[in-house]
């Protein structure tokens, strides 16, 4: 992901262009204030994808930690618990 860098005035004066750039290139646009990075703008689709990927990585890290610390159960027990939980609904 290669980001374009734009001054904050462009966000106000050229919003449509920045929005289109984010959607079409699927790259973030970094907004600067006084020459320093302040904000990252990205398309909504990319935001949702990034959020989903982060949640998946967190879930995988938790699962890896569970395995590392012996917090595991037989798969049949897990399926039985899941089935019982669904039937209670």
Image (cartoon, grey):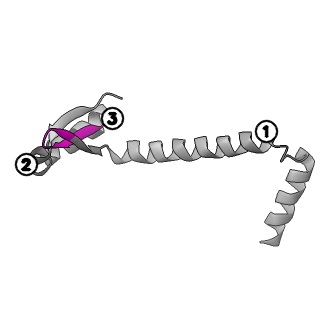
- Residue at the limit of the structure toward the top, as seen here: 2
Classify 10 Å Cα crowding around label 3: few (below 14), some (14-19), many (20 and above): some
Q: Depth-wise, is mark 3 or mark 1 nearer the camera? A: 1
Residue 89 shown in magenta? no
Q: Position of residue 62 (x, y in %)?
A: 69, 46
Q: Secondary structure at mark 1?
A: helix
Magenta range is: 28-36
Q: Residue at x 53, y 43 (%)?
A: 54
Residue on which the image places disc 3: 26
Question: Are circles 3 and 2 on residues that touch, CB within 8 Å?
Answer: no
Give residue 8's position: percent from left, percent from top.
14, 46
Crowd rating for badge 1 (residues with CA inside 10 Å; few <14, some 14–19, many 20+): few
Q: Residue at x 18, y 42 (%)?
A: 32
The mark lying in front, picked from 3 and 2, is 2
> Which residue matches tag 1?
68
Quickly name the residue at label 2.
Answer: 13
């Amino acid at each position: 992901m290669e980001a374009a860098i734009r001054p904050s005035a462009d966000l106000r004066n050229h919003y449509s262009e920045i929005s289109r750039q984010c959607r079409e290139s699927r790259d973030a646009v970094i907004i600067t204030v006084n020459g320093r990075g302040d904000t990252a703008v990205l398309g909504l689709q990319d935001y949702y994808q990034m959020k989903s990927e982060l949640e998946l990585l967190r879930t995988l890290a938790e699962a890896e930690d569970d395995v590392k610390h012996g917090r595991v159960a037989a798969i049949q027990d897990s399926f039985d618990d899941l089935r019982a939980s669904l039937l209670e609904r």
